[in-house]
Amino acid sequence: MSNANPRIAFNGVNAANGQYGLQLDGRQLADLIFGNASPVELRAQKDKYDDAIRNANLPTHRGVGEGIDATNLAQAGWGIIFAHADLHREAIQEALQPLLALRKAQAGEHFRIFTSVDAYRPNESKLDFLRRFKVGSGAVDPKRGVPYYLLLIGSPELIPYEFQYQLDVQFAVGRLDFDAVAQYASYAASVVAAEQGQTRLARTASFFSVTHADDDATAFTDQYLVHPLL
């Protein structure tokens, strides 16, 4: 491609070949904008997208159910999930007790600790986990037994990222993974102190970016989006 008519760097990757999902130069993009032509790449992608939408049984709503305020833990609920295989889960739970007490006071009847027989089991999928509590997919209703906000405890070896990402489609999911039990205690104390106004910390923001070789999209993002913010 000549420098006079460079390729436009779009985000997205074609999973079948590892190339850019959409490859257009300036002239092709202009034709598209003015309605003069529809590039083959875009037309093919649009057809695939339309087919996927037609064939998918997508829920009309994600997040909490109708009438539930997601910003109110007393309505949305809060839960913590331990790994059944974690030999230190009881000690970690004890270390997190100040935070758990605070969340229980905030979430009330919709507070839940998933440990012991309720803990995450090895190789369990999201559906397997939810099935044990008779909960299905769709908008979250904490009255069914699983709160909207869920905190995973442990490393990806104990609770895999795959399970977390599956769960995150439906729930608001976080994770704590520290090397020592004392670090969990320190975290809990810090959160409680911050939320109860005992500690006032200056707010800061951090920005980072990556630049992959032969990848205009990440190079441009690094140069023109992230660096001007620093």
Image (cartoon, rainbow, N blue to C red):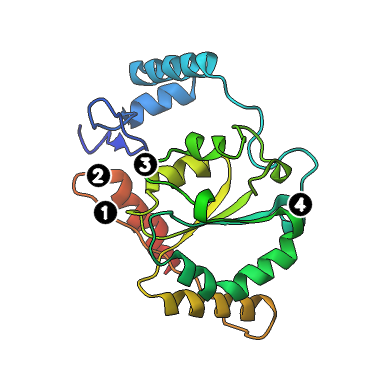
Residue 110: % across, % down: 71, 53
Asked if 113 appears above or below 216 in the picture, the reply is below
Quick one: SS at disc 4? helix
Asked if 83 appears above or below 93 in the picture, the reply is above
Quick one: SS at disc 1? loop
Left or right of 15, for residue 206: right
Q: CA distance from mark 1 to mark 3?
A: 34 Å
Please name the residue shown 24% across and 31% down the image. Answer: 19
Checking the image for residue 75, the label placed there is 4
Q: CA distance from mark 1 to mark 4?
A: 43 Å
Note whether residue 197 is visible. yes
Amino acid, disc 2: Asp
The residue that label 3 is drawn on is 123
Question: How many marks are shown on the rendered structure?
Answer: 4
Checking the image for residue 211, the label placed there is 1
The reply to whether dot 3 and dot 4 touch (C-beta < 8 Å) is no
Please name the residue shown 69% across and 82% down the image. Answer: 197
Q: Mark 1 or mark 3, which has the lower sequence index?
A: 3
Left or right of 55, for residue 220: left
Quick one: SS at disc 2? loop
Note whether residue 70 is visible. no
Please name the residue shown 72% across and 55% down the image. Answer: 71
Pick the front one: 132 or 182:
132
Q: CA distance from mark 3 to mark 4?
A: 31 Å
Checking the image for residue 215, the label placed there is 2
* Quarter location, residue 4: top left
Pick the front one: 115 or 187:
115
Closest to the camera, between mark 3 and mark 2, is: 3
